[in-house]
Image (spheres, rainbow, N blue to C red):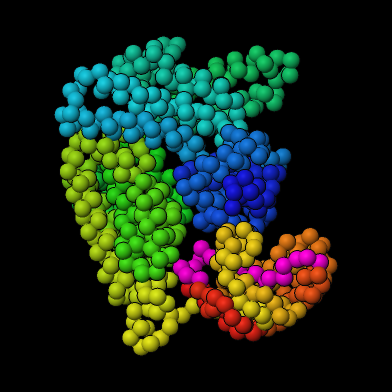
Amino acid sequence: MERDELARKIIERVGGIGNIKSLSHCMTRLRFFLVDDNKTNKLELKKLSILGVQKQGGQYQVIVGNDVSRVYKEIIKQYPRIAGGENISDDTGEKKGSIFNRMLATLTAILVAPLSAIIGGGLILGIRYMFTTLHILPGDSPLVFLLTVIGNSSLYFFPFLLAVSAAKRFNTNIYMAMGIAAAMLDPNIIAKVGEDPVRLLGAIPIPMINYGSSVIPIILAIWFMSKVYGWLDDHLPSMITVIFVPLLTFLIVIPINLILIAPMATYLTTYVSNGLEWLINLNLGIAGFVIGSTRPLLVLVGMHHAIRPLQYMQLETLGYTTIAPATFISTMSQATAAFAVAILAKDRKNKQIATSSTISGYLGITEPALYGIIFKYRAALFGCIIGGGLGGMVSTMMGAKAFSSGMPSVLTTPVFMGDKPLSIVYGLIVMFVSTFGITWFLSKTVFQLDDNIVFTDGISEVGAAKGETAPGHLVFSPVGGQICKLEDIKDETFSSKILGEGIGIIPSENLIAAPADGTVNTVFHTNHALGLITEDGAEILIHIGLDTVKLEGQFFTARCKAGDKVKKGDALIEFDREQIAAAGYDTTVVVVISNTMAYWRIQPEFEEGAIFAGEKIITAR
């Protein structure tokens, strides 16, 4: 499916432009804040070329994968009102979910937006650390100076980036928000850092604190500013708002922020950072194991971004983070689990999925591995949880640190090279051996019969000894006729398998029957196509003829409607194949499993020959 079509269908199936309050994206997901989640069509979304859909922390997340930024750009191109993530709906909607979930959703939305700048700056600083630590370049080298300037450009001035992101999230004036950030980083304050507070009116102290690279202070300041700015804009006479709203906002917000909000938030983050450092410095490995083992589960529910503020707190107060090494090790363990499956899988399609997931996983994009391999294959799940935990434990016990922020990826390894670089190396070795070994061992023993992975050509290894075919979901022919391969159908949408794996049938009968027990999901208004969800969860599309939508329902009669429960063999649609052919249309009936990605293998029983209605045609495993 082309990106423009995918973008359009995603917007349609989340309820349309009017149902979107804001939209942002991270490395793999489109993150919607919707007016009404009930207006979405999750089932139809899953039929698109995406990895999955989930709702977490007030967000409706459409998991696109590595192509998310291009799909997002296409959405912006088609729907310019969404650009920047502003509140675009006319209905503000109700606040839903717990306070914690709403706070988490807000924090995530604010932190995700400027992530690309932080990744770039963090990687540059990591390269600088590697050059100086390994004595490749002297510390006073002009190149080191330049790398420092480039890396610090986004990290030191992080409050400016967050001010913009927070202003969009709180629906307030972006430029006023940047003014608040500028006040926090004013050179007059920076020059007095460490000195006694400046006392306003001789009594009220203004602490001299360096807020560069800070996170929580600026977010709280912009939230407070949004309330003050909004109240003044609503209550002052319209003829003076242009002058007095910004004037009074600065006079109220900046002093209160510098005297109270920002210092309190800084002290809080310092205490939290010191507490985390104390826990990790106990050197029991508990913290590293917990962080390394739980990250895959946090990614599943979208809560992995909740860890990011803790890393920023440590960087702000300590100059390094001891959390990042464990998250890095965990990310590598997810890629390693996918690599183990790529080695183990005998089925070519499974091997391709696992191999591509391995490559993207080592580059830091783990959703393909998580959704395509790990959460479907329990040996891989246990392997990456235990292996990631052990590797994280070893690295933290050896004193691993990251000296700047960056997305966990093999490309960001330099950020760990500023101190005790062997700690991350040993952690990676322990992780790789344990993740790969556990995945391999469990796949051959405990979980062998319970997996969706096919290790031999259609026969499970234990079943093979008994001559038993591996179990699967069965689809039966909805009509009698002659089988033809999907690739031979003269319609690119079907032959390229964009809609999923399946088979074609040149019909010899005029009745479409239910191919399995299930529920009719949709009946196209021209009655030439319908969707069925089987009791096993297979989503089946039956399309009668090619391009027959142009007949506008002529020669088709529906015998069912959306929502009907049907049994295998029940009549669904009658059609007149002779009249359809006489009108110049190909009568081939296409049967497609549209949720193909939910299965490891879609196996047609025949590639050619005669077929009877009710005869098994597809096995989905």
Picture residue at 34% right of the left edge, 64% below the top: 341
Q: Which residues are magenta?
A: 583-602
Q: Residue 203 placed where, x, y %?
A: 41, 15
Q: Is residue 205 in the magenta section?
A: no
Q: Is residue 588 in the magenta section?
A: yes
Picture residue at 34% right of the left edge, 44% below the top: 408
The image quadrant of residue 249 is top right
Picture residue at 65% right of the left edge, 23% below the top: 232
Specify whether 171 is left or right of 587. Answer: left
Above or below, comparing residue 279 to residue 579 in the picture = above
Above or below, comparing residue 378 to residue 239 in the picture = below
Specify whether 598 is left or right of 490. Answer: left
* Residue sitting at the far right: 554
The image quadrant of residue 373 is bottom left
Q: Nearer the viewer, residue 9 or 253?
A: 9
Q: Residue 378 placed where, x, y %?
A: 37, 67
Q: Residue 431 placed where, x, y %?
A: 25, 55
Q: Is residue 607 visible?
A: yes
